[in-house]
Image (cartoon, grey):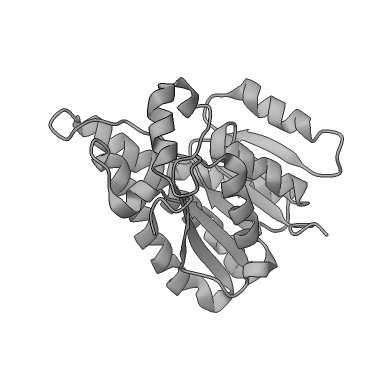
Amino acid sequence: MKLLKGKTAIVTGATRGIGKGIAIEFANQGANVLFTYSSSEKLAKELEDKFKNSDLVVKGYKSDASSYDESVILIKKILREFSEINILVNNAGITRDNLLMRMTEDDFDKVIEVNLKSVFNMTKAVQRTMLKQRSGSIINMSSVVGVKGNAGQSNYAASKAGIIGFSKSIALELGSRNIRCNVIAPGFIETEMTEVLDEKVVEEWRNSIPLKRGGNPKDIAGTCVWLASDLSSYVTGQTIHVNGGLLT
């Protein structure tokens, strides 16, 4: 049985890493997946082609989630093709790491804009549709750093902590219409971004995790599927930690 059969999902920032893993797993579970990307047209096409022979719609949209206007336009485009939007995964994010004394105002502002304001933009843009449906699952991607902080990542930590507070508030606002809003806080997830790191550094991180391994996008995607499906119909306002025991 496919857990998301017949559902339509939006995933922001889905051409690589965690977002790509979520998009693939959603499609494997029977959902139509509409994903966004900022510049990676080739990667977007590769993801579309992966499911071109299936009965599903897996389609990329070039859209900047940090722009409210572009988010509204995106939802309008999607609603011309689909009568419902059942799932929204706010995954788009960037890092501009530096110690506070070296961090520029632009470094701070851009991370807040892409990581946090994008969640406001997309949630607000999709809210009216979900309210009419009287159903929906919104899943926002935070981080272990948003819970415990990290030196050299004050901008990233602030953005990811803000997502948690925002999501709890939305869960309270929209719960009466059967719209759920939850957060996933990944720990150390091994993606294309971590492949460029020194292997000794990566091994030290792995050894600091109780499960003695880094996570992978499938670990996050599996939790996303559960939160998107009817199996979690009584779960809202929660932060699910997927970190191998790194933070308990």
- Left or right: 193 in relation to 145: right
Which residue is found at the position 31% from the left and 30% from the top? 96
Which residue is found at the position 64% from the left and 21% from the top? 42
Between 49 and 83, which is closer to the camera in this rendering?
A: 49
Residue 228 occupies which quadrant of the picture? Answer: bottom right
Which residue is found at the position 69% from the left and 26% from the top? 45
Which residue is found at the position 27% from the left and 38% from the top? 153
User: Relative to residue 107, is residue 163 depicted above or below?
Assistant: below
The picture places residue 69, in percent across and down from the top left corner, at 46, 43
Hey, which residue is sitting farthest left in the picture?
Answer: 101
Q: How many marks?
A: 0
Is the C terminus in the top left, top right, bottom left or bottom right quadrant? bottom left
User: Relative to residue 54, is residue 226 depicted above or below?
Assistant: below
Residue 80 seen in render: yes
Between 189 and 233, which is closer to the camera in this rendering?
A: 189
The picture places residue 226, in percent across and down from the top left corner, at 64, 60
- Left or right: 245 in relation to 150: right
- Left or right: 4 in relation to 220: right
The picture places residue 33, in percent across and down from the top left corner, at 69, 45
Between 208 and 132, which is closer to the camera in this rendering?
A: 208
Is the N terminus in the top left, top right, bottom left or bottom right quadrant? bottom right
Residue 75 seen in render: no
User: Relative to residue 210, is residue 45 depicted above or below?
Assistant: above
Hey, which residue is sitting farthest bottom in the picture?
Answer: 176
